Image (spheres, rainbow, N blue to C red):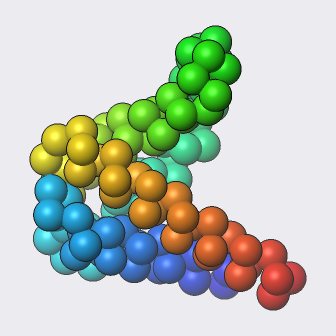
Amino acid sequence: MYVILRWIAFALVIMFTAWVIPGITVENFWAALIVALVLGVINAFIKPVLQLITLPINVLTLGIFGLVLNALMLMFAGWLSPGFEVDGFLSAFIGSIIISLLSLGINMIDRKDM
């Protein structure tokens, strides 16, 4: 049950981000659910490998390159997901920051309830 609620919460976060950021568009709620699923798979399997590969750059930039990596993952999710578009790096960068902050809030609420 928690998995479904978290999935819906992340889809709402994606819809909110698309509403706030002009360069990000989501067609409907079903598309947001697909994007949430795609981002979850990307963050679980692809992102850890990329973080390991880019570790020296991340250390040199004191972690700021991690934000760039998040933006690139959001752009990749936009490329993979139907009904979700990201129009440029700046939109992806700002959108990934908003998604990360709101996801952090969802994760904190989830841990508090357990």
Please determine whether, in this image, residue 5 is positioned above or below residue 31. below
Where does the image place residue 64, in percent across and percent down from the top left?
54, 34
- Which of these two is toward me, 30 or 64? 64
Picture quadrant where residue 73 is located: top left
Q: Residue at x 41, y 52 (%)?
A: 96
Q: Residue at x 66, y 20 (%)?
A: 59
Where does the image place residue 108, in percent across and percent down from the top left?
73, 74
Q: Is residue 19 visible?
A: yes
- Which of these two is toward me, 28 or 99? 99
Picture quadrant where residue 79 is located: top left
Q: Residue at x 52, y 53 (%)?
A: 40
Quadrant of the drawing holding the N terminus: bottom right
Where does the image place residue 53, in percent across and percent down from the top left?
59, 14
Please determine whether, in this image, residue 45 is positioned above or below residue 102. above
Where does the image place residue 60, in percent across and percent down from the top left?
62, 16
Q: Is residue 89 left or right of residue 5?
A: left
**Residue, far right:** 114
Q: Residue at x 13, y 47 (%)?
A: 87
- Which of these two is toward me, 54 or 63? 63
Please determine whether, in this image, residue 97 is positioned above or below residue 46. below
